[in-house]
Image: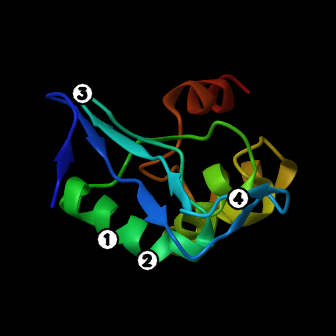
Amino acid sequence: MKKQITDSVYYVGVDDKTIDLFESQYVVPNGVSYNSYVIVDEKTAIMDTVDPRAEEAWVSNLEEVLEGAAPEYLVVSHLEPDHAGSIRRLAEKYPQYRFERHKGYGTKLHYELLAQHGPSPIHRKTFLKRVEEG
């Protein structure tokens, strides 16, 4: 079931009641919520992923909101598993870019793969402009 927050914002996060110790130090007897949102506007953005232990439910929520469309942006708060643990899913969906190796940074390999395959639907347009300018 879609959880619409506003006209263009959807909650796609999940609850994880299987965890009892968050970040190996905080007792969470009721589990945790991994917050993730999709903004559907002129461009579509995913705000954070979730810990891999809750990935299947997150992907299901995400697919329901995206309805087959590809996101244009992924914004991650920081690279801890509760926010970035499912980035690998993007690497699986677009394997030719090897996102799991460089996490979007402009490495030599990333530039070579862009030259070979062209940009994916989720590449940032501002990054591509810098690539074109050389």
Can you tell which mark lies on residue 60? 1
Question: Residues under labels 2 and 3: Cα distance?
Answer: 27 Å
On the image, numbered disc 4 is attached to which residue?
Answer: 81
Residue at screen point 39% across, 72% down: 57
The reply, left or right, for residue 121 in relation to residue 65 is: right
Amino acid marked by disc 4: Pro
**Of the residues under marks 4 and 2, which one precedes in the sequence?**
2
**Of the residues under marks 1 and 4, which one precedes in the sequence?**
1
Question: Residues under labels 1 and 2: Cα distance?
Answer: 6 Å
Can you tell which mark lies on residue 56? 2
| Callout 4: SS | helix
Looking at this view, is 103 or 120 the one in front?
103
Marks 1,2: beta carbons within 8 A: yes
Residue at screen point 66% across, 25% down: 130
Amino acid marked by disc 3: Glu
Can you tell which mark lies on residue 128? none
Can you tell which mark lies on residue 42? 3
